[in-house]
Amino acid sequence: MNSEKIFSDDKDYIAGTYARFNVAFKSGKGAKLYDFDGKEYVDCASGIGVNIFGINDEEWKKAVKAQIDEIQHVCNLYYSEPQAELARALCEKTGAKKVFFGNSGAEANECAIKVARKYGNTRYSRNEIITLKNSFHGRTIATLSATGQDAFHKYFDPFLPNFRYVDPTMDGIYSCYTDKTCAVMVEVIQGESGVNCLDFDFLRQLEKFCKDRDILLICDEVQTGNGRTGYMYAYEASGIHPDIVTTAKGLGGGLPIGACLLFDKCKDVFTYGDHGSTFGGNPVACAGALSIVDRITPELLLEVQGKGAYLKINLEHIKNVVSVSGMGLMIGIQTTKPAREVAAKCLEKGLIVLTAHDRVRLLPPLTINKEEINFALKILNEVISQ
Ligand SMILES: Cc1ncc(COP(=O)(O)O)c(C=O)c1O
């Protein structure tokens, strides 16, 4: 197989939902990737925040292979050791009380929406959920309904009712809140819409607002979670305590998994039959995820904060950079150039970066080293300052 054959098969047989760059990756190690022609790239995307310990991560592979040799799938009618261990590890790391496993970020958010509606409906006949403008919560109909961007609300009507989108301010929240509001759902950093960090004062006021009214606070940490921002979950940086946290992407280290973490108030909302998934909590995915979660240590988080700060300082000095946003190794760069053009030029020069709206977005593996970071800065400088 060569790249050209892959491109043509893809065009012929795969639904055209992705604006792909003309590269097919064959292999890699850490933050290095190689295409089918042997060209080397430094990876500042990690498969959109998934491969957080890089490509070909030995510990993750060992955990996954060991589980494959035991059993590849157990249906959720029976108990599963890796699932139970991963749930315990997530609860011990976060203070959550119960976990529901799905297969993706969208599924984790679907689960959160269901928990919030059951909580609200059964206690107070409430079923409205407030989300933020410019949010992104997934591609299923419910999570698209939760997504506060008009661009996502075309073609697929009818969407679910009872979602309201507000600016990330308390005025916005008050303007939309009704006696039917059961939850508010936020991304601490809005990744897909350009790496927009919410104001921590707003988050703390929102937490109080929700607690005073027994409205659930949901943090969608699908992109920000699992060490990405220099915290296990980004909400920790603000000091708030959400009732539900959703996570996916980096949790699996490369295999599909999503989790909905339920804190005190929500831990017993679901009972038999309320929710389920054939593949949710698959033992191989869970064994891999456990090897990831176990390695998100305070030392790693400090490293991520340091690498992020180094990147940010150096990016801010590049000519034509307007602003740099984000936390840890989740970085958005506003430049005077079209983001996709920057990404395409970087790729030509052997650097993989992402875009998010009009920004260039960096989500490198958390283990990216200094030499690779400096290479990324050199290429970004060449491309952006030209
Ligand atoms: C904040 C957030 N929520 C949900 C999702 C959807 O996750 P998935 O693509 O795994 O369904 C994404 C994906 O980018 C995301 O960034």
Image (cartoon, rainbow, N blue to C red):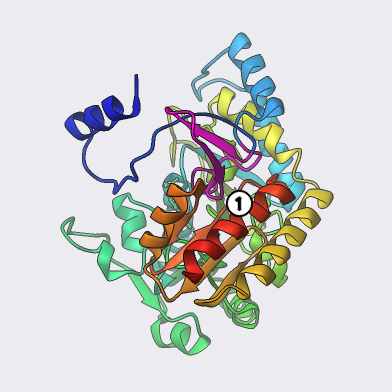
Q: Nearer the viewer, residue 136 or 279?
A: 136
Q: Position of residue 163 (x, y in %)?
A: 34, 68
Query: Badge 1 local density, few (<14 within 10 Å), some, or many (20+)?
Result: many
Q: Quadrant of residue 287?
A: top right
Q: Which residues are magenta?
A: 31-54
Look at label 1 and name its amino acid: Leu
Q: Position of residue 219 (x, y in %)?
A: 56, 62
Q: Residue at x 40, y 65 (%)?
A: 339
- Mark 1 within 8 Å of ligand 1, using the beta carbon: no
Is residue 118 visible to us here?
no
Q: Nearer the viewer, residue 139 or 370?
A: 370
Q: Position of residue 229 (x, y in %)?
A: 66, 59
Q: Residue at x 66, y 57 (%)?
A: 233
Left-right relation of 10 to 266: left
In the rendered image, residue 39 lying in the magenta stretch gets the answer yes
Q: Nearer the viewer, residue 300 or 235?
A: 300
Mark 1 = which residue?
A: 262
